[in-house]
Image: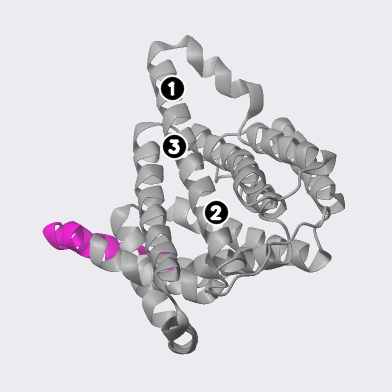
Amino acid sequence: MRRRTGTHNAAMPWQAFALVLLAALAHAVWNIGAKKAGGGTHFVLMGALFVGVLWAPLGLWLAVHEVPQWGTTQWAAVLASALLHLIYYNTLLRGYREADLTVVYPVARGSAPLLSSAAAVLLLGESAGWGLAAGVVMMALGVFLIAGGPALWHRAHDPAQRARLRAGLLWGALTGALIASYTVLDGFAVKLLLVSPIVLDYLGNLLRIPLMLPAAWRERATAARDWRMQWKVALLGAVLGPLAYVLVLYAMRLAPLSHVAPAREVSMLFAALLGGHLLGEADRGARLLGALAMAAGVVMLVLG
């Protein structure tokens, strides 16, 4: 099995930083489209099918050259990644059904980098300095402020709103844990097992399709309706979604995962600036402070 020691530099190389910024922009645009489309489980399947077709030339070409060299460890990593991503999608959608997006999304995106960075330090042996710690905290604070800041806690005074808030915190935390899990697993696959980021994402996507088809077949009428209404946005997601994550995976090869994972959350900054509807009725002042906090966090990560 081929192995390569992970990057342990204190600061994030500018090339990795540029990849993360491009990925964050693509991720923000894709999520704004998905939010407006109101996608559900059928929407996820649509996107997976489009990815299977659009990325086939590159994904299969790379797979033909790489997969024959794989052992059990590589296949186990790809299969585990596919399952984690599928559970993540379902958990996120469940959270959106039971709570407000303005709670679920920021809790998920804010907790994920904290968990990912901690796991990278503890499990992958990456070093942790003051820049990493301060940057992660500032990024998490920025996500919270962009989501509305202290105004979120005012909902706790009403019983119905309190129940939704608790549900949002629960499902958001579970989603964040899943994001952190697949981030660390995929980082291990591309950094230490040397699995191609494109092959990892493409094959993982293909492995998820048969797991989703039975439910779509049972709900054929609803699936057909969703296809007619949402296929254009699903097609956009099939281009931008994999592109964003593959850029992140390549960044993980150039920089410590503990730096790349929190830097990904700059997508919230782009989302706030490009389409303030992503997180609902967030206060403009809090969103501005959040954007500044995230910018400061990114600088701290780059400087290490």
Marks 3 and 2 in Cβ contact (< 8 Å): no
Where 45 falls versus 266 (above or below)?
below
Q: Which of marks 2 and 1 precedes in the sequence?
A: 1
Q: Main secondary structure of the magenta part?
A: helix
Where 249 falls versus 148 (above or below)?
below
| Corner quadrant of residue 210 | bottom left
Of all residues, the one furthest to the left in this rendering is 218
- Residue at 76%, 38% in the rendered image: 133
Where 276 falls versus 187 (above or below)?
above
Give the Cα separation between the discs numbered 3 and 1.
12 Å
Verify whether residue 73 appears in magenta. Answer: no
Q: Which range of residues does the magenta coloring cover?
A: 213-234
* Spot occupied by residue 100 in the image (x, y as percentages of width and height): 45, 33
Mark 3 surroundings: few (<14), some (14-19) or many (≥20) residues within 10 A: many
The colour scheme is: one colour
- Which residue, given by chain and number where applicable, does mark 1 sit on? 166
Tag 1: amino acid: Arg
On residue 174, which mark appears?
Answer: 3
Q: Nearer the viewer, residue 194 or 288?
A: 194
Give the Cα separation between the discs numbered 3 and 2.
14 Å
Q: Which of marks 2 and 3 precedes in the sequence?
A: 3
Of all residues, the one furthest to the front in this rendering is 1
Q: Nearer the viewer, residue 8 or 214?
A: 8
Q: Is residue 271 left or right of residue 175?
A: right
Mark 2 surroundings: few (<14), some (14-19) or many (≥20) residues within 10 A: many
Query: Helix, strand, or loop for circle 3?
Result: helix
- Which residue, given by chain and number where applicable, does mark 2 sit on? 183
Q: Which of marks 1 and 3 precedes in the sequence?
A: 1
